[in-house]
Amino acid sequence: MDASRIRAYLYLALFIPITFLFAASALLGTLLDGSGRVYAVHARLWARLALAMAGVRVTVNGSEHLPAGPVIFMSNHQSNFDILALLAAMPRQIYWIAKKELFDIPVFGPSMRRGGYIPLDRGDGRKALKSMDNAAAIIREGKSVVMFPEGTRSLTRELLPFKRGGFILARKAGVPVVPVTINGSGRINPAGLIRLSSGAIDIVLHPPLVLPPDISKSEAETALMERTRSTIVSALEH
């Protein structure tokens, strides 16, 4: 067994109990504060501790591009450490849109729900549409959310095909999309492998994109998806 694999197992032995400890603490905190701020503080501290335990440094470039008001951050996804890096270093409070099954996990799921994270039903069409409308309404209220348009982690440094759902959501919510490029996470913890190395993760925040006017909804979503993809690729290390 090589060193990176041993390191990964040792890391998980600490990471899992710490995660449930923070989730339980955050859940209790939300009973006193329903705004989500207490949960956000817990999430940021948890992520920073998890990164420090792994010997990972995170830098963010492009914060000056962020507009006022809510946005949907669309990021490439190479590693579980993408989530930690975004939670630890993003310059504003963020919320996650996650598949509804995650909200059924004991302690962790109720903690996410109380923290204001948004469940998305990816099942049958009617439930999925209602779930999308609910998410759009929450975003319009002022929450900036993060999505991975690939839908899963890429096993290489190449982008997978994008799912359309996030761009439908951007149209329904009427908010800009901020493309995000993450570099370095795939080397630290490659998708599909139990490996862990120390290193650096670089996050690039690009200027916001909006739906093009005067074309059909479907065409506008496709155009926004293509522009988001090309923007992410423009800063992606190969």
Image: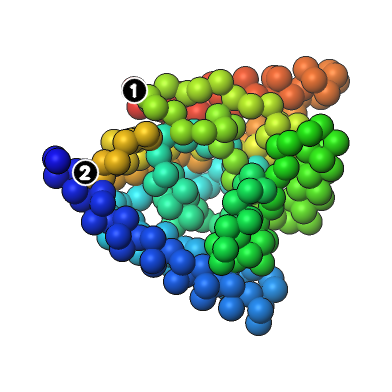
| Mark toward the viewer: 2 or 1 | 2
Tell me: 144 left or right of 48: right
What number is the disc on residue 134? none
Res. 207 visible in picture: no
Instruction: Return the residue at label 2.
Output: 5
Q: Which residue occupies 39% across, 46% down? A: 81
- Amino acid identity at mark 2: Arg
Q: Which residue occupies 78% across, 34% down? A: 124
Instruction: Return the residue at label 1.
Output: 238
Q: Residues within 10 Å of mark 1 (few under 14, many from 20)?
A: few
Q: Looking at the picture, does residue 159 appear above or below residue 9? A: above
Tell me: 47 left or right of 231: left
Q: CA distance from mark 2 to mark 1?
A: 24 Å
Q: Which quadrant of the figure contains the C terminus?
A: top left
| Upstream in sequence: badge 2 or badge 1 | 2
Residue 116 image offset from top left, x and y in percent:
67, 61
Q: How is the image coloured?
A: rainbow
CB under 8 Å between discs 2 and 1: no
Q: Which residue occupies 60% across, 41% down? A: 147
In this view, the residue in front, 103 or 66, is: 103
Tell me: 126 left or right of 229: right
Q: Looking at the picture, does residue 88 appear above or below residue 63? A: below
- Amino acid identity at mark 1: His
